[in-house]
Image (cartoon, rainbow, N blue to C red):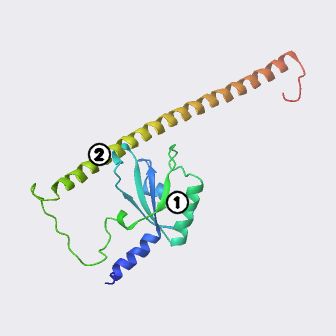
Amino acid sequence: MEPSTEYVAFEEKVKKTIYIDNLSPQVTKAVLEYAINQFGNVKDVRFVPTYSASCGVCAALVEMESAKQAEEIICDMGDSPLMISGMPRPVRARKARVEMFEDRPKKYPRTIVCRWMDRSHQNFELAKKIKDLTKKHGAEAQYLMELQVEEEEKLHKQQSETLKTNYKKYELIDDADGNVKRLKAEYGMTLNDHY
């Protein structure tokens, strides 16, 4: 059975699309498009829901002009992290997969029927275990994302404090330089060439 022509065109779109995650919630479509345009021509940007959205981590699907550009971006961002919106959270890029698109067309025409499973069914316990395991994995992923966000906030705070401290040091140096020049002029002294 051959896939539909709509699905074949969709697969081409997927090849030109990259998945970018670990984005800050402050990142907008325009900011992301501007940042990625450094690497190639962006055709479309769509934010997609993530399981860790409550932790403040977002993701996006970015469609490029060609599949080659998409591959180059993935290589470039793999070699060196790209910071968007000044957050200490390097974004990650990888190839988009068909499952990431909510509006994907059907590959083959078929219908899926869902039913409630009776407790007496032979696979009920297996289905229940899978459901519980999925919930457990979701909770673990949520906890790990919360830890990561907490660490990133600590890093951001530390970097801000370091920046403020360095700025104060430079101000003191500038003030000291001005005082030395003033004292030199007042007392008519000659000092080395640095002053």
Q: Give the amino acid type for the residue marked by disc 2 in the picture.
A: Lys
Say which residue label 1 marks.
Answer: 36
Q: Give the amino acid type for the residue marked by disc 1 in the picture.
A: Ile
| Residue at image location 49% in from the left, 54% down from the top | 92
| Mark number displayed over residue 136 | 2
Q: Are marks 1 and 2 in contact (CB under 8 Å)?
A: no
Residue at the front extreme?
122
Is 175 in front, or is 33?
33
Q: Quadrant of the C terminus?
A: top right
Looking at marks 1 and 2 on the same chain, the residue that comes earlier in the sequence is marked by 1
Q: Picture coordinates of residue 164 (x, y %)?
A: 58, 30
Position above or below: 82 against 164: below
Is 190 in front, or is 186?
190
Q: Picture coordinates of residue 105 (x, y %)?
A: 31, 73
The residue mark sitting in front, 1 or 2, is 2
| Residue at image location 89% in from the left, 26% down from the top | 192
Q: Picture coordinates of residue 159 (x, y %)?
A: 56, 35
- For mark 1, give the secondary structure: helix
Left or right: 29, with 81 as reference point: left
User: Which quadrant would residue 127 be assigned to in this image?
Assistant: bottom left
Q: Picture coordinates of residue 162 (x, y %)?
A: 59, 31
Visible in this render: residue 40? no
| Mark number displayed over residue 185 | none
| Residue at image location 54% in from the left, 66% down from the top | 71
Q: Quadrant of the N terminus?
A: bottom left
